[in-house]
Amino acid sequence: MARAVPERDAACAIAQAAAVVGDWWSLLLVRETARGRHRFDELQRELDISRKVLTERLNHLVDSGVMDKVPYQEGPVRYEYRLSATGRALLPVLVSMQDWADRWLLGDGTLTASADEHSAEARRLHDLPGTRLPRLTLPAHTGEEQDPVDPDAAATVLFCYPATGRPSPLPDGWNDIPGTVGCTLENRLFRDAYDRFTAAGVAVRGVSTQRPDEQRAFAAAEEIPFPLLSDMDARLAAALRLPTFRAGQALRLKRAVVVVDRERTVRHTQFPVTDIPHAVETALAEAISASR
């Protein structure tokens, strides 16, 4: 179980945070609830954890305010475990840990916005088809919160990209990071193909970690017809374990494409994306296939 914080570290925020989520199982439970697994049995099955340890860790996270215990059935009463506002605020930390491990433990330390096709990041993305995207919303450039999955579309294409250079300047050395160049081109290509996507009943969403006001200025300048969603709080990145990199003191999404059907099931992924025009055409073909 979690340790009590010694008196000498009572004012240390790192020690206080470690006392809540510094345990292996506690971090993995935050990871799994972010991915949409909320019930005791599915958490136990996914993590292969003993019922005793799982009960202890869930109770600790509830008592610490990281999770809310929510009834979903009566007679007998059964509960789900969902991230509270405090827990959701942990997601950027969780994704930052993933990013650090991808680069320094599972990779060779290279700063890149792409990846080798045999990397751990690529394997995670390639294993996504068949999983379900949990219900969540992200701020849209249009001013409201939106579900990444369009409920009225036969399928939704989510294309993730690092950042556009308008309106804010990109960090120094941006173009020297492999995989960063091409975000404006990618948006333009999806824009130019948008009529073909809509004719096929397919929705398009662009996703980056830029702020909604930055996305709004870019969308206006480029006449982007589809929503641009801000994952600045890492909710989508945590839900799908999307690959990221850090540049300009901010987490950025690596370029990837995810096709989701109307049942929220991931049907196709593309990562790494090295040929952007080909990725747009492949996204359309896979989305049409997913909608059948």
Image (cartoon, rainbow, N blue to C red):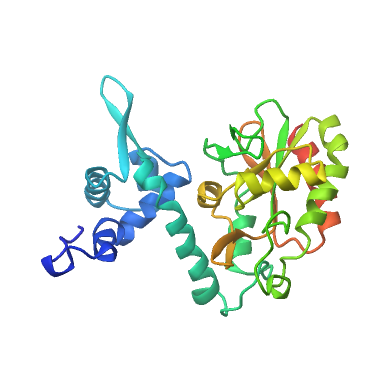
**Residue 157: percent from the left, percent from the top?**
72, 42
Tell me the quadrant of the picture where the C terminus can be found.
top right
Query: Vertical placement of 126 versus 39: above or below?
Result: below
Residue most extreme to the left: 7
Residue plotted at (31% across, 46% down):
66
Residue 89 visible to an observer of this rendering: yes
In this picture, residue 78 sits left or right of residue 168:
left
Query: Which quadrant holds residue 287?
Result: top right
Query: Vertical placement of 166 versus 245: above or below?
Result: above
Q: Please tell me which residue lies in front, 276 or 163.
A: 163
Query: Which quadrant holds residue 241?
Result: bottom right
Residue plotted at (55% across, 61% down):
251
Residue most extreme to the top: 75
**Residue 25: percent from the left, percent from the top?**
32, 57
Q: Please tell me which residue lies in front, 227 or 108.
A: 227
In this picture, residue 224 sits left or right of residue 85:
right
